[in-house]
Amino acid sequence: MTPSTFVIAGGGTGGHVLPALAVARVLRQHGHSVQFIGVQRGMEARLVPAENFPIEWIQIGGLNRVGLKKTLRSLFEIPGSVWRSIVLLKQFRPAAVFSTGGYVAGPVLLAAIFTRIPIVVMEPNAVPGFTHRRLARFVQRALVSFPESANWFPPGRTEVTGMPIREEFFSVPPKMRGGIITVLITGGSQGSAALNRAARESWPFWERSALKAKIRLLHQTGSQMFLECQKEFAATGLPGEVSEFITDMPHAFSQADLVVSRSGMGTVSELAAARKPAILVPFPGASDDHQLKNAQAFRQAGAASLILDRDLTGQTLVDEIVRIVSEPGRLERMSQAAHVVAKPGAAERAAQVLEYLASQSQGKTVA
């Protein structure tokens, strides 16, 4: 088909930006132009330019569970951000707008509605996020991870594709078990205060653990607690590394025997693709408890164990890691179960849907 331009909106966190980048890479490989719209304080400010995609900025904050002051500020920003988005869409003239959610998506999708540009959304959670929920009836196609998500969109407009993630996660080689067990602890791109706290609490317990000489810790903290965690970890003498942000997460996964993380859909999709056993700690503030539902599904499949946020301490973390590692064959069984859950090809399918909408505007169809 004739090369087209697509606008992608989705940001704030890595969970929104990384799936968007996975789709953008496929579109670029197919010869299309991709333009991002984001906010400068979101993860897109770091990740999108690093992939050599152009990005324009709007000024907008969140509206869901952010408190009165931030809500009022965001409401004040909406008219200007929508107008700015309309100007950008008229400038780029995209064949379609693709959204992975987050507060940046709201003004861009409203602008797409006003300018009559087709909208495709990627919704990873059983209950859609605030923006996609409010604008569901204007969506031409919703690509979802759970069949029940279809209840929120007009009939016949949803497709279960799974989450678009980087193909590198599917290429992570199986980990050969050795004498050293590497545990990767990550709270996502922005870090997790609860996971950081539990990791720090765990360091003294490793000194008394049966796995003391066999454990290696890789810990992504996020920016807020990085310096203090890095300094304290160095003083423990434990093998491993503390990082503010891991750019090459597939490589980090390849080193890990076990991953400790939150259970957003992007994270659990990456774990499944890479066949990584996991200890999942759902974020209790997640909308509609979607992280708990994700973690329960992975536990039921045999791919993960679950620790509730309220039960997470350094001691419980060490105990669970020791329990999993000490059970013969447990890591291998969890790895096999994770592989069964994986859904490859989501990024490719999202690109095909966008290309189909573009072909309709060109008077063609895609085989």
Image (cartoon, rainbow, N blue to C red):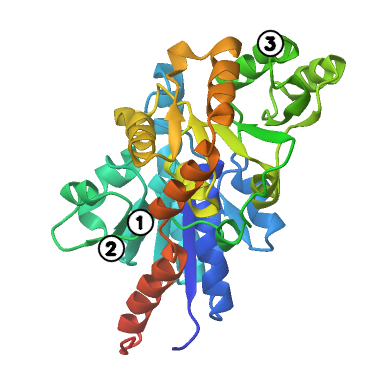
One can see residue 36 in this view: no
According to the picture, the residue beneath numbered tag 1 turns out to be 121
According to the picture, the residue beneath numbered tag 2 turns out to be 141
The residue at 34%/86% (across/down) is: 366
User: Is residue 186 or residue 33 the one in the foreground?
Assistant: 186
The numbered dot on residue 34 is: none
Q: Residues within 10 Å of mark 1 (few under 14, many from 20)?
A: many
User: Is residue 183 or residue 40 the one in the foreground?
Assistant: 183
Q: Quadrant of residue 173?
A: bottom right
Q: Position of residue 259 (x, y in %)?
A: 58, 36
- Which quarter shows the N terminus? bottom left
According to the picture, the residue beneath numbered tag 3 turns out to be 205
Precedes in sequence: disc 3 or disc 1: 1
- Which quarter shows the C terminus? bottom left
Task: Please say if the residues under marks 1 and 2 sit with CB atoms less than 8 Å apart.
Answer: yes
Q: Position of residue 126 (x, y in %)?
A: 28, 42
Q: Position of residue 40 (x, y in %)?
A: 62, 42
Q: Residues within 10 Å of mark 2 (few under 14, many from 20)?
A: many
SS under mark 1? strand
Q: Amino acid at mark 3?
A: Phe
SS under mark 2? strand
Q: Amino acid at mark 1?
A: Val
The residue at 33%/75% (across/down) is: 357
**View extreme (front): residue:** 328
User: Is residue 95 or residue 172 the one in the foreground?
Assistant: 172
Q: Residues within 10 Å of mark 3 (few under 14, many from 20)?
A: some
Q: CA distance from mark 2 to mark 3?
A: 50 Å
